[in-house]
Amino acid sequence: MRRHKVITTLVLTFASTTLMANNTLPQPPAGFAVTALQLPAGCEAGYATGISSNGHITGITVCGIGQIGVLWTPDGSISRLKPLFSGGASLPEQPNDSGVVAGRATIDDDFHPDFHATVWRGGTIKDIHPYPDPNEEFNSWAHDINNDGVVVLEAQPDFGEFRAVIWKHGSFQDLGGLCASSVFSYAFGINEADAVVGGSYPCGAVFEQAFMWLEHGAYGLPAGMTNLNDPALGLPTLPPSTFVSWGVDVNDLGEVVGQWVNDDDFLTRSFVWVPATTLGTQAGMIVIEDGSNQVRARALNDQRQVVGRLDVPGPNAAFLWQSGTVLDLNDLIPAGTGWQLMEATGINDAGKIVGSGTLAGLDRPFLLTPTSPGG
């Protein structure tokens, strides 16, 4: 039985400011057309991982016992993304409008393989692991890429360390951490202004908090790395029971979507952080929650539409959040399609959504296209 969930955004008063969702944004679409993305010959399953503004889509397909990355272009063609070595796995995460793709690929064929961050361009693959790794024992993962080709990644310079790094025009920059002595920081998203979001450990903290890093001051924040959940910003924060948070995506307005975990029940929920410079809306943290279900946001667009996964009893469900409302995407596709949409991983400014679900008992990648204005 399909669920129809309309969950309003929590009202926050933790920073002496009442914050509610901005209801002046476009309303969610009435529905979506669902398309099963084509799989390469010989592949029986797969899932989509990201979508660019102009409709390039990345995904990972299961072909026999191997995983092969693919790129679907806006004209509907599909190409395989080669691995670093024959028989290895290629695991893309995000394309840009030129069809350049960021992700990772295996560097060995061990039972528990290691990975290096990679970029695919025009049929070639480039290893962009930022630190020396002569014994191929350290990992890195590229998570996002903008239209200037700037890539964000998390990487291991040594055992027990993770660093947030950007790769820009062939050069690397370690972004440091919220605390100068921290050896743990992770970068997950980047926008067209090179604003980077992720998670890092503040001084004296046991767990990471969501950050934005800027080369130059913007969005009311200074240059460098800023804790978005810091009360010193003077903006509404996450609840005091929050013990960990991290940013996963940032749009071109400087709005950040991320996840957080509550110390009271250890459930994962999500948030949107709105900068103080945004006109016509209140700034700070907006909590996205769905009762006792876990809400794992994956992406947002410039319309402040958020997509991700609801961990619910029974099959998980892909969701769309907009203007304070969580919608199960299974309720927004035509009845009788046979789809169970399990997770949404990307959304562009046209409101097109990609992700993974089950169709005829197999894991398949999908594309959702709004069927009415407002998407």
Image (cartoon, grey):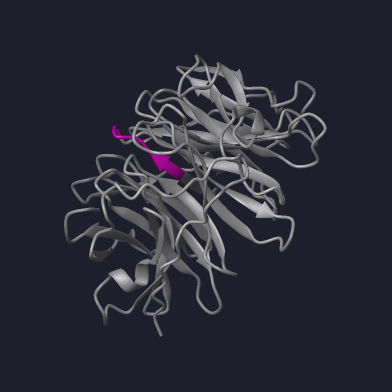
- Taking the spot 71% from the left edge, 36% from the top edge, the residue there is 138
**Picture layout, residue 162 above or below residue 336:** above
Q: Can residue 87 be seen in the rendering of this structure?
A: no
Is residue 95 found inside the magenta-colored segment of the image? yes
Q: Quadrant of residue 296?
A: bottom right
Is residue 70 found inside the magenta-colored segment of the image? no
Q: Can residue 161 be seen in the rendering of this structure?
A: yes
Horizontal and vertical percent for residue 102? 46, 36
* Residue interval drawn in magenta: 93-98
Horizontal and vertical percent for residue 66? 52, 58
**Picture layout, residue 297 above or below residue 202:** below
- Taking the spot 41% from the left edge, 55% from the top edge, the residue there is 324
The quadrant of the image that shows the N terminus is bottom left
Can you name the residue that lies furthest to the bottom here?
A: 1
Tell which of 6 and 110 is nearer to you.
6
- Taking the spot 50% from the left edge, 76% from the top edge, the residue there is 315
- Taking the spot 66% from the left edge, 61% from the top edge, the residue there is 267
Tell which of 140 and 85 is nearer to you.
140
**Picture layout, residue 199 above or below residue 6:** above
Tell which of 1 and 154 is nearer to you.
1
Horizontal and vertical percent for residue 93? 46, 44
Q: Quadrant of residue 307?
A: bottom left
Horizontal and vertical percent for residue 362? 42, 74
Number of marks drawn: 0
